[in-house]
Image: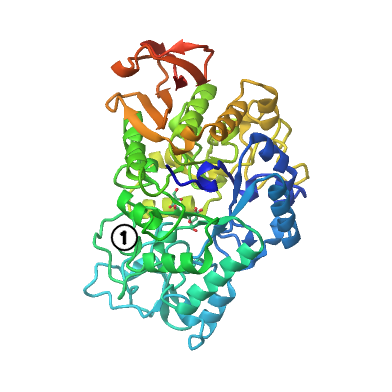
């Protein structure tokens, strides 16, 4: 027996609204633009849409800096537009989850404006304000901070921002520092303050009353900061202090409270959690845990980095990817649930990173799709992935819009952590903007993303003539059709959703092979993670088994499981009988 849930059976599609479809010709995607494409999504067969932030925001971090949680950003449309989108989705049986960004707000949120203007005011302790300290006795250098010349102090602790540089900024009016784990225009909310929790819970209820089906929760394991805000343990950590503010002491209390207050049984929640162990994931999601549906974890997104973090590079191997994801498959087999993704709006395109975006573009995109839709967990498709969209050939930093890239490169340069010769290679490989170029709908000038005079806010990938939705939909062998088949297969076969995952050939360098089993139903997945032919020797007990080839990214027909040579990036799913 197993516990059914709609969000376990769903395939989620992620829409980054700025880059999806522009309906009014200003070069920015918008909500009416999404509505125009709802039939496209229904045709693909997805069950749930995760909408990146569409709230009122000054746009320092493309909407992750929220100025008002209950208003839609003008550029994206109106609340009526949002309601029309909700209805268009629901009419087609597609659920809608919103992005919940409550670790921080924008500095333009009324709470922060108020907190900054009047230190005595009630909103002050919605955020983290502290006096600085004497630099003597610390290893911090006052010159590293942006303070007036006569202020010879350093922040209350040594924490750093995920975007590079200090996590504290000095406020001249009150002579105090405030905390921001991301940009200085994104101050951290103080969850210790009961009113903050109350405000967040009410806001969530307000959205549930408007008919949403759940939330993706942004950096939700950062919301609890330890008493006394101590320095980080390791002065050489990539993000100093993260050992203190990631999975902080009261995070489980807050999330359990949130769960009990706001969430009903049908609500889906997926917590975005940087730096997380399987054990911690079980605490967040497990039966006796905080009741989240699932988490996004990032171990598999670190395989191509050195200890120096995201602005470094090392070669990843299929074997490590297999080991890492298997660790999570096994770790959450009894309790908890996996989110399956290889890219999102913060990551480069999966095809360019884990596949081959050149010669074997089509084969490797289909192999990655097979993996994501046959592991145990909920698959997430990031817009354009189903077309095999690739990274963008950035030539210079001037083409990059992403605050994270710009600030991290600046910080890495300053600290001498990056070689000048490597900067552009790393940016091209790693920047979040790879995911943010316009969705490619057709081969027209702006790929059908916008038809107005304005140029798109991000350049269109030059491969739009070959890689676009129109071409893909008219070709039955396309990556798009392959996604569609996988999505529909998942609906037919419980084993794909609920079946056990058992890894075979763990030590093989390039083959990733596993079975999925539910009662009598059993599938065998064989993936050749290589641009060369690879010999597949099935394990003894499966050899000669009659099987139907359920999924294949090459020509194939009825077979039995035998020693065979797999072609480059070949993916097969056998239905074992
Ligand atoms: O981008 C990253 C990895 O590629 C991370 O450092 C990222 O900032 C982190 O995973 C948190 O991401 C989320 O919160 C950020 C926002 O910029 C991201 O877009 C969001 O997904 C701050 O709200």
Tell me the quadrant of the picture where the C terminus can be found.
top left
Vertical arrangement, residue 393 with respect to residue 576, above or below: below
- Colour scheme employed for the rendering of this structure: rainbow
Q: Nearer the viewer, residue 373 or 543?
A: 543
Q: Residue at x 55, y 55 (%)?
A: 266
Near-viewer residue (439 or 103): 103
Q: Residues within 10 Å of mark 1 (few under 14, many from 20)?
A: many
What is the x, y in percent for residue 509? 31, 24
Residue drawn at 32 percent across, 15 percent down = 537
Q: Is residue 71 left or right of residue 233?
A: right
Examine the rendered structure and indicate whether residue 226 appears above or below residue 460.
Answer: below
* Secondary structure of residue under mark 1: loop
Q: Nearer the viewer, residue 197 or 491?
A: 491
Instruction: Using the rendered image of the protein, determine whether residue 111 is visible from the camera's viewpoint.
Output: yes
| Whole-percent x, y for residue 448 in the image | 72, 37
Give the residue pinned by disc 1: 240
Residue at 62 percent across and 57 percent down: it is: 212
- The one of 154 and 5 positioned closer to us in this rendering: 5
Residue 326 percent coordinates (x, y):
34, 37
């Amino acid at each position: 027996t197993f516990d059914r849930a709609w969000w376990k059976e769903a395939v989620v599609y992620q829409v980054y609204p700025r880059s999806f479809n522009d309906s009014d010709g200003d070069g920015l995607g918008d909500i009416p633009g999404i509505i125009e494409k709802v039939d496209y999504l229904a045709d693909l067969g997805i069950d749930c849409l995760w909408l990146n932030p569409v709230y009122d925001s000054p746009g320092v971090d493309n909407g992750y800096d929220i100025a008002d949680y209950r208003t839609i950003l003008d550029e994206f449309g109106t609340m009526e537009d949002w309601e029309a989108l909700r209805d268009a989705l629901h009419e087609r049986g597609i659920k809608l989850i919103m992005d919940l960004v409550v670790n921080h707000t924008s500095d333009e949120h009324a709470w922060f404006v108020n907190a900054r203007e009047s230190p005595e005011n009630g909103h002050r302790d919605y955020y983290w304000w502290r006096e600085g300290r004497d630099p003597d006795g610390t290893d911090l250098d006052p010159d590293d901070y942006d303070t007036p010349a006569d202020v010879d102090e350093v922040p209350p602790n040594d924490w750093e921002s995920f975007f590079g540089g200090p996590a504290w900024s000095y406020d001249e009016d009150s002579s105090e520092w405030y905390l921001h784990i991301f940009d200085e225009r994104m101050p951290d909310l103080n969850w210790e303050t009961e009113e903050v929790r109350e405000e967040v819970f009410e806001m969530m209820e307000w959205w549930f009353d408007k008919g949403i089906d759940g939330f993706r929760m942004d950096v939700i394991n950062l919301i609890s900061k330890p008493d006394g805000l101590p320095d980080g343990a390791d002065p050489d950590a990539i993000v100093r202090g993260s050992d203190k503010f990631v999975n902080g002491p009261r995070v489980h209390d807050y999330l359990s409270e949130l769960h009990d207050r706001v969430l009903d049984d049908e609500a889906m929640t997926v917590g975005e959690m940087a730096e997380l162990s399987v054990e911690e994931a079980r605490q967040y999601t497990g039966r006796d845990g905080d009741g989240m549906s699932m988490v996004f974890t990032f171990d598999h997104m670190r395989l191509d980095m050195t200890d120096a973090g995201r602005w470094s590079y090392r070669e990843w191997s299929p074997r490590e990817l297999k080991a890492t994801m298997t660790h999570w498959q096994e770790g959450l087999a009894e309790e908890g649930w996996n989110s399956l993704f290889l890219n999102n709006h913060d990551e480069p395109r999966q095809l360019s990173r884990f596949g081959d975006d050149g010669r074997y573009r089509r084969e490797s995109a289909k192999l990655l799709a097979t993996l994501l839709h046959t592991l145990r967990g909920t698959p997430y498709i990031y817009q354009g992935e189903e077309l095999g969209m690739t990274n963008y050939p950035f030539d210079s930093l001037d083409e990059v819009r992403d605050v994270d890239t710009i600030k991290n490169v600046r910080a890495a340069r300053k600290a001498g952590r990056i070689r000048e010769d490597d900067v552009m290679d790393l940016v091209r490989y790693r920047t979040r903007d790879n995911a943010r170029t316009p969705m490619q709908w057709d081969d027209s000038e702006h790929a059908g993303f916008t038809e107005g005079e304005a140029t798109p806010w991000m350049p269109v990938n030059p491969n739009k003539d070959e890689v676009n939705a129109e071409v893909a939909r008219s070709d039955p062998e396309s990556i798009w059709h392959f996604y569609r088949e996988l999505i529909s297969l998942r609906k037919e076969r419980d084993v794909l959703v609920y079946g056990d995952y058992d890894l075979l050939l763990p030590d093989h360098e390039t083959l990733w092979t596993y079975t999925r089993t539910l009662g009598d139903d059993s599938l065998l997945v064989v993936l050749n993670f290589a641009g060369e032919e690879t010999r597949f020797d099935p394990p003894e007990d499966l050899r000669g088994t009659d099987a139907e080839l359920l999924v294949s990214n090459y020509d194939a027909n009825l077979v039995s499981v035998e020693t065979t040579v797999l072609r480059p990036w070949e993916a097969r799913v056998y239905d074992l009988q």
